[in-house]
Amino acid sequence: QVQLVESGGGLVQPGGSLSISCAASGFTFSRYDMRWYRQAPGKEREFVAAISTGGITNYKDSVKGRFTISRDNAKNMVYLQMNSLKPEDTAVYYCNAYLFVWPKISYDYWGQGTQVTVSS
């Protein structure tokens, strides 16, 4: 049974830091690209950060230099360290695991999300 379980969300003041985690199970974690998405109230879900199986990272422009994604294949964990948080970072953050098998098979798993609220 595939599971992605996010944790670590909460309330933080503007300018503060927060680290969220995602525990994966039920699939071969090391083969999957891992991503974080977020969805603010009334808005569509958007990409935040990604880390490939080889450790290459990619970020949404507005979080570059503030957020850091990392993974631990030995523990089947992916992390998102968020610094210098802004109120506009408030959202439910979702963990995503993605694998594309050429030519046309893809596997796409989602967690249930963790709430991050940035407010004074």
Image: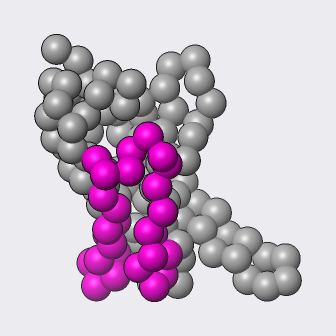
Colouring used for the render: one colour
Between 25 and 118, the one lying in front of the other is 118
Please give the name of the residue rendered at 33% of the width and 72% of the height, measured from the top-left corner.
71
In this view of the protein, can residue 76 be seen by the observer? Answer: yes
In this view of the protein, can residue 27 be seen by the observer? Answer: no
Single out the residue that lies furthest toward the right.
Answer: 103
Q: Which residues are magenta?
A: 51-78
Please give the name of the residue rendered at 28% of the width and 85% of the height, measured from the top-left corner.
74
Q: Is residue 43 left or right of residue 115?
A: right
**In the rendered structure, does residue 21 fall within the stretch colored magenta?**
no
Residue 14 placement: quadrant: top left
Residue 72 placement: quadrant: bottom left
Q: How many marks?
A: 0
**Vertical arrangement, residue 103 with respect to residue 69, above or below:** below
**In the rendered structure, does residue 52 fall within the stretch colored magenta?**
yes
**Vertical arrangement, residue 12 with respect to residue 84, above or below:** above
Q: Quadrant of the C terminus?
A: top left
Q: Is residue 35 left or right of residue 19?
A: right
Q: Position of residue 92 (x, y in %)?
A: 42, 34
Single out the residue that lies furthest toward the top.
Answer: 120
Between 100 and 86, the one lying in front of the other is 86
**Vertical arrangement, residue 41 with respect to residue 17, above or below:** above
Residue 83 placement: quadrant: top left
Q: Is residue 71 left or right of residue 34?
A: left
Q: Position of residue 97 (x, y in %)?
A: 53, 65
Q: Position of residue 82 (x, y in %)?
A: 26, 46
Q: Position of residue 22 (x, y in %)?
A: 34, 58
Please give the name of the residue rendered at 32% of the width and 68% of the height, measured from the top-left corner.
70
Please give the name of the residue rendered at 58% of the width and 17% of the height, measured from the top-left corner.
42
